[in-house]
Image (tube, helix red, strand yellow):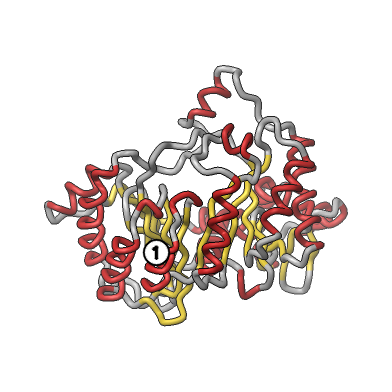
Amino acid sequence: MSNDIAAGLYIHVPFCIRKCPYCDFYSVTDRSLISDWLTAFRQEVSLYEGRFSSFDSLYIGGGTPTLLNGSQVTAVMESLWSTVSLLPDSEITLETNPDDLTQENLALYRQAGVNRVSVGAQSFHDEELRYLRRRHTARQTKQALSMIRAAGFDNVSVDLMYGIPGQTEDSWIKSLECALSFDPEHLSCYQLTIGEGTVYGEMAAQGRMVPLEEEKERRFFLLTSELLTERGYLHYEVSNFARSESYFSRHNRKYWQHVPYLGLGPSAHSFLNSTRWWNTRSVTEYCQRLAQGGSPLAGEETLSEEQYFLEALYLGLRTREGIDKTLATGHDCILDQLQSAGLVRVTEERIIPTREGLLVADSLPLLFTN
């Protein structure tokens, strides 16, 4: 992949007030390190000056990026504008936690260049939010969404979660309906996952938490897809829905399409010309290395042709674009079986997963590896 293609830029803000029990993203609760992280971030940006020709998407994620105040987000953006080529029409997304938002900070975020806001709602039921140990309430999420609109943002994404213990299909529909009442341009609907190394992972290992049954998982997924597509949203990736193609997440699509991307901050990953590299998973080490004039790099790998092929299958079959038909050359029998099962449809050039196919997307690539 040429580095002449506009790449994606990700910034990992590794700070949280407290750690959610389901989250396996890297973060720390020591906010006294924010100043050192900002300094180290500026130093890391300079390491990549000229490495990528340009960027047309920026995603500020975490952690909890809205623990940065408006002036700190402005400082981050100023470092980028002065060092890398961020194109004028770039999609610039900020992940937000509802109870962090104020009209003042939203105005500063917008002035800094943020033009897309992702809201970590997760649920519009307080009992479910308490189970997830979220620090906001449903009321605060509604207030945040109203403030975001009042601040002039016209590209808003809402994150919601299903498969929460005790959650019913009815309560899930009510959360979806509440989100839809704010007319978001984008929705990300994820199943609660129980990851190793998380509090919930430990509880599951001890038998104190049971994963969602497969049939219930299927029903939640299909219910979500059917309801949102009926409301006019495009189901363009396993967990993602948009009001139109113009609201597809430009940044996330770079991951799914093997387009180059640069990740900055502790634990962030980057990809260019079939090579992937990643940073140390420690704020302290990240800051120390950069303060000493070094690199925060923790490792790298160059994908073999087989690895690249497998990733192209895995990523592509999770999206409504599907994969190039040539990737399945020699697997006509498998394709026939998948079509008969209603899991894919095949055009002259593409293999595209159906709604049922998206439900089992992660297992489909294995069928093409024999």
Residue 15, compared with residue 326, is above or below; it is: above
Q: Residue at x 73, y 65 (%)?
A: 233
The residue furthest bottom is: 88
Q: Is residue 120 left or right of residue 281?
A: right
Figure quadrant of residue 8: bottom left
Q: Is residue 256 left or right of residue 214?
A: left
Secondary structure beneath disc 1?
helix
Other-residue count near label 1 (Cα within 10 Å), few / some / many at <14 / 14–19 / ≥20: few
Figure quadrant of residue 311: bottom right
Residue 76, compared with residue 29, is above or below; it is: below
Tell which of 144 and 63 is nearer to you.
144
Residue 260, compared with residue 125, is above or below; it is: below
Is residue 301 visible in this depiction of the protein?
no
Tell which of 188 and 7 is nearer to you.
188
Amino acid found under the numbered disc labelled 1: Glu
Say which residue label 1 marks: 104
Q: Position of residue 216 (x, y in %)?
A: 77, 36
Q: Position of residue 347 (x, y in %)?
A: 78, 71
Tell which of 21 and 272 is nearer to you.
21
